[in-house]
Image (cartoon, rainbow, N blue to C red):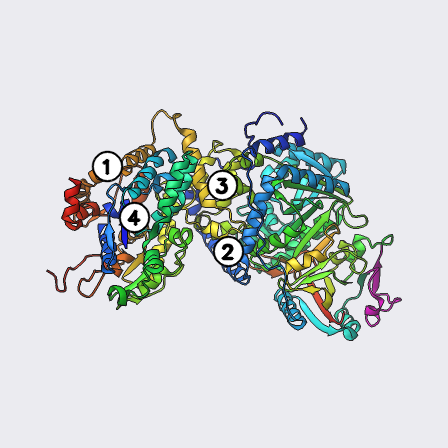
Amino acid sequence: MSAKEEILSRITSALRDAPTPEPVPREYRRTSDMPEAELIELLVDRIEDYKAHVDVVDSAQLAATIAERLKDATSFVVPHGINEDWLVEAAPANDARRRVDAPGAILSIPELDSTDAVLTSSAVSIAESGTIVLDGTPDQGRRAISLVPDHHVCVVPVSTIVRLLPEALPRMDITRPLTWISGPSATSDIELERVEGVHGPRQLDVIVVKGL
Amino acid sequence: MGMPSLPVFGDGNLHIDEPFPDAAHRELGNTQMRANLRHATHTIRDKRLKVVGELPDWEELRDAGAATKNHVMANLPALLEEFEKNFTARGGVIHWARDSHEANKIVAQLIKEQETDEVVKVKSMATQEIGLNEYLEEQGISALETDLAELIVQLGHDKPSHILVPAIHKNRTEVRDIFLAEMPNVDPNLTDEPRLLAMAAREHLRRKFLAAKVAISGANFALADSGTLAVVESEGNGRMCLTLPETLITVMGIEKLLPGKEDLEVFMQLLPRSSTGERMNPYTSLWTGVTEGDGPQNVHLVMLDNGRTAALADKYGRTALNCIRCSACMNVCPVYERTGGHAYGSTYPGPIGAILTPLLTGIKSEENSSLPYASSLCGACYDACPVKINIPEILVHLRGEDVDSKRGKKKLPTQMDLMMKGAGWAFSSGKNLALLEKGLPLGKLAAGRDKKIKRLPGIAAGWTQSRDIPAPPSQSFRDWWKKEHQSPAKTEQEK
Amino acid sequence: MKIALFATCIVDAMYPQTARATVKILEHLGHEVIFPTGQACCGQMHINSGYMDEALPVVTNHVEAFEADHYDVAVAPSGSCVASVKHQHPILAERCGDAALKARAEAVGAKTYELSQLLVDVLGVTNAAEQLGSHFPHKVTYHPSCHGMRSLGLGDRQLDLLKSVGGIEFTDLPEADQCCGFGGTFSMKNADVSSAMLEDKTKNIESTGASLCSGGDASCLMHIGGGLSRTKSDTTTLHFAEILASTIDEPVSVTGEVFVGKGGK
């Protein structure tokens, strides 16, 4: 008997009393109704609690804000699908600071390691927990680019913010590689006190964009 | 599938080799460890209460979590098949392991195929349980723990004492000393500030992450309807392991399944708040088999039994498998707070360990029968458990299994056996108890002038090591009722 | 209302004044109290120690004793014993394969109340000074026992009743929700851990400066009191029923002595 067959047979034996559990009660909050301004306020409060920096801007100010957040970076990586309009002030296409990661033209791990920052968009954000989800679509890129550089600048369009986790999951394609980010990397491993900044990006700047 | 088979128990790092009271006695003497644990557990208790209190629907989430897990256990074969089909369809490879030895062999073989002798690891209870690091070392493969607390334990040649924060028994100064002594190229002026200690770990591990060919992980959840795996973490070491190496090997207990994506909406609210007391952990990674151009292209999953099916066969104990390894139960446990995790001997300490360990290994294994008694049954663990595992009830059930397993095997009854037999006689009828209570004045006599009993023989000496017993009254309530309160008419009837 | 008293074995044999206080309170409120004489013990010492076979006759006896009389509700001055009657008895009967006993145990359990539950939820007592004439001019702190707090969900019922006693000076107990370390035979089998828990409990009690620590379970109070006594503390323990039963005319001392009639008889 293969290991699989044997384990399945053991399970069948273990369940010979045929337990019939009750149906799953879903009485918890699955929908919400929160005005946009409050939603933004909640998300900002939660993300700042994680010691990340948050700007809330109109779409017209986005390019300038990105430039401001990236001004100290000697180099930064962008995924190939990033909106060019976002970069007009930070680094036009011919700028030497800018490194594009694209399928077929990926940056090596050492290249990523020598890059100061990364700019990505995001797929959906959960206000109640201050969580931003990246899903690897072209304006967010593959997972490594938002991991290896030490400074992550992440754009959150207001239209992608929901209040509750149950409202966010239907917006995710679960089979894509997903990364849920709640603040910069952190640890509570010493005396269970949280300190920010370990292996993931130590600096997280979030730009919440109204009208996007 | 033929005749029902007997439960097949697990092995690995699942044994306490001395009775819990002896181990606890030793650990209680470590005052530094006790101070560290008190500080850490009280910190996390307050954080957990704050973030749990924020959610108006916490109890509803717990109800959904408990019911979901019960559903998973009742439908495990179908869900496992469904998961395997989906994970495999997307390029992942599944291996099944009956026990720790089989799992270790599979993992070692997969590593050897990649022609490397060093792997990076993200914290995993399953690999701790099966003793993977020790096995790989025998095979000439070094496994580098990358979680900060695991790293502290590994560098300190120590054992984990907590499932979430394996180095919880160490304070910042002790961590600094371990780093200074054991970490190559560490700054000799390193202070004990946690932020700087975390930085030192970053420096130490960064080259390893960037160069690793193979990573090993556990998994917090597996979604059957999509074949997706999830790892919940804080530091980014998980993302490093799950993203950069070409080969990823995940070891996961068969009980980790969830039916589908919508279940994450429950468990990803329950888990972070219960474990680190955060609204959400910094990073959660989800992957489904292989994604071209993103992350490991050689993806394996080892599905582990190692006694889980035996636990499932115990209908009063099987909900222990619902555990999502949050550690809330140990953080609130007054016994764990004082003895620390090492006293429990097993990979799984604290209240959940006191039930899960003997369920996985069988109650008769080594000294594991002493684990279900490592509780005052105060119930704080049950209140804190995000999936409502009734730990006190299962502890009591396993005590019953222990007593029953020893019936008729002993040449002489123990003192506890005799005490229970005597009390059983006294307590099984009002008349018997009334007869016994005639002896109360004798106890009063024994207590002497200060009206205290200070020393008792045998197992009752445990009580009098730190407590007096008051002198009994000269008259029981029953006696008073009959003689002084009950109406004469009633007394007459009884005659 | 006709109320059947379940004294519990420890109160019956060691703390009869707690049961007498319970009777006094209920009779003061105008209810008839009966004492089913077949009763002995709830059996939780056996159950919690794993001696299920030995527990079965004890549980059966309890069920029979409380089926023998007609009454409206049963009451016990113990959260732990009531939790056992309500939760453990049916489980034990099921485990021993006795479905009929399970149903009978459930019926008895459904009619059984812990004292503060009965007073607050059924009898509508919210102010002990006004409704019971309770008077106890001493500084008191309070330990909520685990089984009452967690298994029965008593909340602040005992605490609120105590605070409403005339003349009482109440002081909060630090880390009140922490177990005192009793746990039945846990205190013998794991005496070292139990003692460490007790030490923290007694230190917290002494830090309040209270004359006594009250609570709703005689077993926990015996444990805490035994620890205080061993450290030669002046602080004592007293069941909340005895404090509720203390009146200006029949005051109870901090050690539980009852003075019948003002100035003594």
**Amino acid residing under circle 1:** Asn
Q: CA distance from mark 1 to mark 3?
A: 36 Å
Disc 4 with disc 1 on a shared chain = yes
**Chain to which mark 1 belongs:** B
**Is A66 situated left or right of A168 in this image?**
right
Point out the tag, 2 or 3, that comes first from the N-terminus. 2
| Residue B40, numbered circle | 2
Mark 1 against mark 2, which lies toward the viewer? 1
Q: Nearer the viewer, residue B449 or B158?
A: B449
Classify 10 Å Cα crowding around label 2: few (below 14), some (14-19), many (20 and above): many
**The one of B228 and B11 positioned closer to us in this rendering:** B228
Residue for point 37% across, 42% down? C105
Q: Secondary structure at mark 4?
A: loop
Looking at the rendered structure, whether the residues under marks 4 and 3 are on a common chain is answered as: yes
Residue of label 1: B432
Give the alpha-carbon distance from disc 4 to disc 1, as whole Å. 28 Å
Q: What residue is shown at x 65% (from left), y 40% (from top)?
A: B79
Disc with the residue nearer the chain's start (1 vs 3): 3
Q: In which quadrant of the rendered view does residue A33 lie? A: bottom right
Residue at 72% x, 48% y is: B287
Label placed on residue B355: 3
Give the distance between the C-alpha atoms of the residues marked 2 and 3, in whole angstroms. 23 Å
Q: Nearer the viewer, mark 4 or mark 1?
A: 1
Q: Which residues, given as a range, are shown in magenta? A: A79-102
**Amino acid type at image mark 4:** Arg
Would you say residue B116 is visible in this rendering? Answer: yes
Q: Which mark is residue B171?
A: none
Subunit ID for the residue under disc 4: B
